[in-house]
């Protein structure tokens, strides 16, 4: 009885206990470092779309904004307040959009006057060499510095006005997805600053 | 079975003669998934070697006190622990690589190589030899997937370790970085390896679910487990 | 509902586990020689996948998350999977011994099938709900089945083809896999909007 069931179980338990103990130790040591890495990475990625800002306040999620009565698209993930010298100068919105190969995540930096400060394609599953080029400044720079009155619109030729964005050749779906995300981000910030 | 194994031959075994990737055909999942760039292959190989050496060592140390009945769950626990340790270390100190390799890091725990070596070697040999076997197999794996990664990167993106190499020689074929390219590169490299090492037709009996590899057989030969 | 459908189609076609995500390769390359074995293996994998997704999701949600033990995910998940496979083995042995015998060695090998653990890791990464996780597992299994069946057909034909010595066995299989994989890339545009 002892040899057959109890002993093996005890040994197995001991092995698990020792291993888990070692794991808990390593976790304890690495956890603060990992958390800090995440925080730094987040701040850095926010800065890439809002260079002028020196600090970003903790994000409010799309859900939280909804409970505050703000009209928020379901694709909005988070809203960060961008600050400079302690003053709020704008926002960074992280928004999802459906691309060619799945979900895209886009960061959009927008100031209080609704000028687009920066755009970054944070994660995507688009085709390398085609849709993936939406991450390049060649495409995203088209949005910069604009404060559109109406929504951005994707066209397949050279744009006629500020609200038109030229699609990437052979990657219209991705181009449209990014544009849609930007539009939703702008709409959110518009609600936040109380504009029309 | 061999009695006194020479440490050096144990170490070298995993590099060519029983190269886990090109000969034993173990650990196919990561070999195909992360080899889009040479750097990733190197990183994955190093991580897997860490787990391999660690688990081989511990399993070899406890092999005499763990009853056969609970052998499998015990080994799984050990391997999973080392895998998680490498996960945490990477997340803390090499976050970029961690992001590149993604879920394939925790998937090291089901990398057939590790379990196979535990069963085939660590269970039957002392700690020193087991560590050497781990190092050898790990090195063989690292070498193999770095080569695969290099081929795919050079042909698919024109760079090696991020450094542009082909320049204007030819237009890189994106296909190599995509899944089909992985299969293709692996297929050709295994064929090349076979040719270079003058392989004879292997024993068809050994073709089991682990992709190949008599190590896969032995797990089942022990009559199912736990 | 639309979300679930997208997950279903996605995992089967767009990001087919074997041909796109490279999960479940080991048994894929080894088992797929005969269509009958392939079917049996796939069935077992789908079954284990669905159960494992359910159990690991529950374990993650009610055991690991509340106690901030996320770092124990890998170890917990793999132990759950190993236990499930063991359980399936025992049950099959008692209830359907013929199937148990037919699957033979492939059954315990499901434990090391990257697809099973991979599916669990993915639902964590994507923060799926319980239903989403289970549907995803089911879909992943179907995708695996699809790839396996397609492949066993190809391999059966390859048996009679004239192949250079160095390519015999694994290499030619991999090349064939590469061709099947290319066709699946065509599905990439399926999930839009």
Image (cartoon, grey):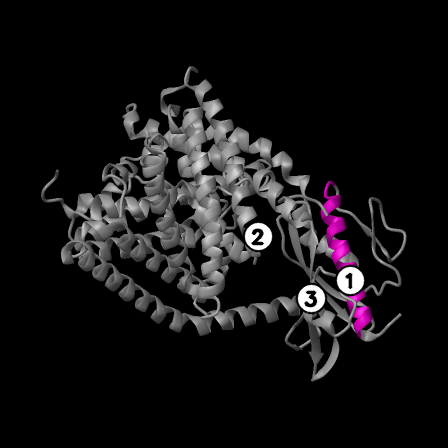
Q: Is B174 on the left-hand or right-hand side of B53? A: right
Determine the residue located farthest toward the bottom in the rendered image: A86
Q: At numbered mark 2, what does the secondary structure look like: helix, strand or loop? A: helix
The answer to whether one can see residue B172 in this image is no
Q: In the rendered image of this protein, does residue B199 appear above or below residue C191?
A: above
Residue placed most toward the observer, B159 or C42: C42
Q: Is B78 on the left-hand or right-hand side of B97? A: left
Give the crowd class for mark 2: few <14, some 14-19, many >=20 residues within 10 Å.
few
Residue that mark 3 sits on: A49
Disc 3: host chain: A
Residue that mark 2 sits on: C131
Disc 1: host chain: A
Residue sitting at x 25%, y 48%? B118
Alpha carbon separation for disc pair 3 and 2 = 36 Å
**Pointers 3 and 2 in contact (C-beta within 8 Å):** no
Q: Closer to the observer: label 1 or label 2?
A: 2
The answer to whether one can see residue A148 in this image is yes
Q: At numbered mark 1, what does the secondary structure look like: helix, strand or loop? A: loop
Disc 2: host chain: C
Residue that mark 1 sits on: A144
Bounds of the magenta span?
A170-192
Residue placed most toward the observer, C99 or A173: C99
Q: Is C88 on the left-hand or right-hand side of C189? A: left
Alpha carbon separation for disc pair 1 and 2 = 41 Å
Residue sitting at x 52%, y 50%? B162
Give the crowd class for mark 1: few <14, some 14-19, many >=20 residues within 10 Å.
some
Q: Position of residue A101 (x, y in %)?
A: 64, 45
Alpha carbon separation for disc pair 3 and 1 = 10 Å
């Amino acid at each position: 009885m002892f040899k057959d069931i109890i002993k093996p179980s005890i040994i197995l338990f001991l092995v698990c206990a020792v291993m888990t103990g070692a794991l808990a130790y390593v976790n304890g040591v690495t956890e603060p470092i990992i958390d800090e890495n995440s925080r730094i990475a987040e701040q850095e990625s926010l800065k890439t779309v809002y260079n002028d800002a020196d600090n970003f306040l903790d994000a409010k999620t799309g859900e939280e904004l909804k409970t505050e009565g703000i009209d928020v698209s379901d694709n909005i993930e988070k809203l960060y307040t961008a600050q400079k010298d302690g003053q709020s100068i704008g926002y960074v919105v992280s928004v999802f959009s459906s691309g060619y190969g799945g979900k895209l995540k886009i960061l959009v930096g927008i100031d209080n006057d609704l000028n687009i400060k920066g755009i970054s394609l944070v994660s995507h599953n688009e085709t390398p060499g085609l849709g993936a080029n939406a991450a390049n400044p060649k495409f995203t720079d088209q949005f910069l510095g604009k404060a559109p009155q109406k929504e951005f619109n994707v066209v397949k030729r050279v744009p006629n006005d500020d609200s038109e964005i030229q699609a990437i050749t052979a990657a219209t779906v991705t181009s449209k997805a990014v544009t849609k995300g930007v539009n939703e981000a702008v709409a959110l910030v518009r609600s936040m600053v109380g504009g029309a | 079975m061999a009695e006194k194994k020479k440490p050096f031959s144990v170490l070298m075994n995993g590099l060519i003669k029983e190269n886990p990737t090109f000969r034993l055909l173990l650990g196919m999942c990561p070999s195909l998934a992360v080899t889009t760039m040479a750097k990733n292959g190197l990183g994955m190989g190093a991580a897997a070697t860490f787990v391999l050496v660690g688990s081989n060592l511990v399993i070899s140390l406890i092999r005499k006190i763990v009853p056969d009945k609970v052998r499998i769950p015990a080994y799984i626990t050990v391997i999973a622990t080392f895998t998680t340790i490498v996960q945490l270390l990477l997340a803390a100190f090499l976050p970029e690589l961690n992001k590149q390799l993604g879920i394939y890091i925790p998937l090291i725990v089901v990398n057939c190589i590790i379990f196979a070596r535990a069963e085939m070697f660590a269970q039957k040999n002392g700690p020193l030899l087991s560590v050497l076997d781990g190092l050898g197999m790990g090195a063989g794996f690292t070498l193999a997937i770095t080569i695969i990664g290099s081929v795919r990167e050079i042909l698919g993106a024109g760079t090696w370790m991020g450094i542009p190499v082909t320049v204007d020689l030819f237009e890189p074929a994106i296909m190599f970085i995509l899944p089909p390219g992985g299969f293709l590169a692996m297929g050709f490299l295994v064929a090349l390896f076979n040719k270079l090492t003058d392989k004879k037709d292997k024993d068809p009996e050994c073709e089991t679910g682990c992709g190949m590899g008599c190590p896969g057989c032995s797990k089942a030969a022990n009559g199912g487990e736990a | 509902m639309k979300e679930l459908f997208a997950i279903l189609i996605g995992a089967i076609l767009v990001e087919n586990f074997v041909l796109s995500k490279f999960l479940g390769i080991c048994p894929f390359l080894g088992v797929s020689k005969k269509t009958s074995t392939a079917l049996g293996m796939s069935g077992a994998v789908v079954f284990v996948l669905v159960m494992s997704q359910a159990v690991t999701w529950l374990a993650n949600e009610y055991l690991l998350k509340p106690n901030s033990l996320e770092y124990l995910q890998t170890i917990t998940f793999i132990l759950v999977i190993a236990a499930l496979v063991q359980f399936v083995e025992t049950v099959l042995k008692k209830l359907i011994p013929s199937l148990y015998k037919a699957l033979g060695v492939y059954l315990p090998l499901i434990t090391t099938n990257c697809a099973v653990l991979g599916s669990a890791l993915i639902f964590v990464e994507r923060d799926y709900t319980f239903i989403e996780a289970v549907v995803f597992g089911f879909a992943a299994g179907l995708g695996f089945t699809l790839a396996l069946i397609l492949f066993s057909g190809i391999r059966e034909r390859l048996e009679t083809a004239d192949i250079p010595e160095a390519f015999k066995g694994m290499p030619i299989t991999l090349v064939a896999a590469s061709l099947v994989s290319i066709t699946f890339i065509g599905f990439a545009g399926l999930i839009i909007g």
